Amino acid sequence: MRKLAADLGVTTTTIYWHVGHRDELILAMIRRRSAQQASRRVTGASPRDRITSIATTVWRDALEQPHVTALAHQAGATTLLGQPAREAFARELDTAGVRGRDARDAMQAIFLCVAGFLVAGLGEIDAKAPDRRLFDRTIRAVVDAFVPESREASA
């Protein structure tokens, strides 16, 4: 807190007064990041494209802000950080006609895929950039395995 206060040019009591203790500051930062993610526009012409877009955004955001990702994990707030993505996935899966257990399995597979690439990517931050092509191919294969090509295909 002292370093943060010095970086901001304020006293630590100012931070405590406006934000609260360290845990409250961390949760506020995670909530803000979550709100930023929720405001992101989902792109793509089909549910498959939009779901892939959401997964890619989650992966990129986490790699771009590894400290927020790590703090969310340490604070037990990964659910809070990932809530906008879960809601977006649920909407798109519903649009594609994927519901119930199938939707649950699809979301779990997608999150596990993204998480696996995050573990690998966060471990390589100082070494090299994560392999975007491999991520794109893998997430697309996972999404394609669970999401029909079109709404009519799921009927």
Image (spheres, grey):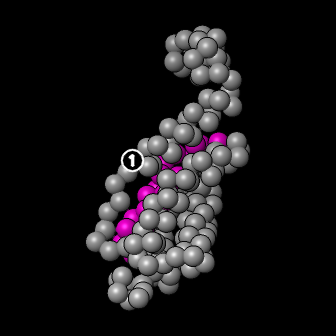
Residue 13 vs 105, above or below: the answer is above
Nearer the observer, 1 or 143? 143
**Magenta-drawn segment:** 48-71
Q: Is residue 140 left or right of residue 119?
A: left
Residue that appears at 44% across and 49% down: 38
Residues 142 and 104: in front is: 104
Q: Position of residue 36 (x, y in %)?
A: 43, 43
View extreme (left): residue: 45
Residue 133: give x, y in percent of width and height: 43, 72
Q: Position of residue 83 (x, y in %)?
A: 55, 53
Q: Quadrant of the C terminus?
A: bottom left
Q: Is residue 153 left or right of residue 2?
A: left
Residue where numbered disc 1 is placed: 39
Sort mark 1 into few (<14), some (14-19) or many (20+) by Cα contacts within 10 Å. few
Image quadrant where residue 132 sits: bottom left
Q: Residue at x 34, y 54 (%)?
A: 41
Q: Residue at position x 57%, y 17% from top?
A: 18
Image height of 39 relative to 138, above or below: above
Q: Is residue 129 visible?
A: no
Magenta portion: prevailing SS class: helix
* Dot 1: element: loop
- Quadrant housing the N terminus: top right
Above or below, comparing residue 58 to residue 49 in the picture? above
Q: Position of residue 120 (x, y in %)?
A: 61, 63
Residue 56 within the segment the image draws in magenta? yes
Amino acid type for the residue under numbered disc 1: Ser
